[in-house]
Image (cartoon, rainbow, N blue to C red):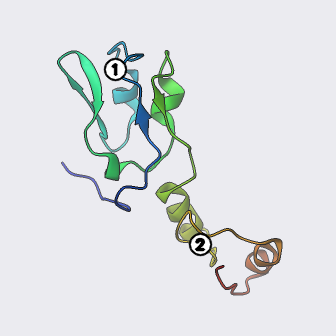
Amino acid sequence: MRFPVYLHNVATLALDEDKCTGCGACLDVCPHAVLVRHNGRVRIDDRDACMECGACATNCPVQAVTVQSGVGCAMAVINTALGRSSSSCCCVIETSEQKAANSSGSTATPR
């Protein structure tokens, strides 16, 4: 089963193959099957499906997987679900005025 692609080539997910022991802890927690086991080692199979939740990095016992949670598309989905108008992408920085406007229900203009 293929999962949705959020934005092409923006996920911060990285795998240090030299550190990876192939334990599979990351495979057990990834909600989108971004990582797969291949020849006893883990590899990134579908980086664009990564929602940057951070579960893989949190559960890797040897810190072979890294991801900046909330930087990319997962944050955009959360912002949209919360009704924040300033950002549907990690590239937009919300000013304090925009944050105040968002919390009061006003529409803010992205930078």
Residue occupying the point 57% across, 66% down: 91
Is 66 on the left-hand or right-hand side of 47?
right
**Residue named by callout 1:** 24
Residue 21 horizontal/vertical position (percent)? 36, 12
Give the image quarter of residue 16: top left
Query: Nearest the camera: 93 or 83?
Result: 93
User: Along the polypeptide, which appears first: circle 1 or circle 2?
Assistant: 1
**Residue named by callout 2:** 87
Q: Is residue 5 above or below residue 36?
A: below
Residue occupying the point 51% across, 56% down: 72
Residue 4 horizontal/vertical position (percent)? 30, 58
Residue 94 horizontal/vertical position (percent)? 71, 70
Looking at the rendered structure, the secondary structure element under dot 2 is loop
**What is the CA distance from the residue labelled 1 to the residue labelled 2?**
34 Å
Residue 38 horizontal/vertical position (percent)? 19, 24
Q: Which quadrant of the rendered structure holds the C terminus?
A: bottom right
Residue occupying the point 52% across, 67% down: 89
Q: Is residue 78 above or below residue 66?
A: below
> What amino acid type should be assigned to the residue bearing mark 1?
Gly
> What amino acid type should be assigned to the residue bearing mark 2?
Ser
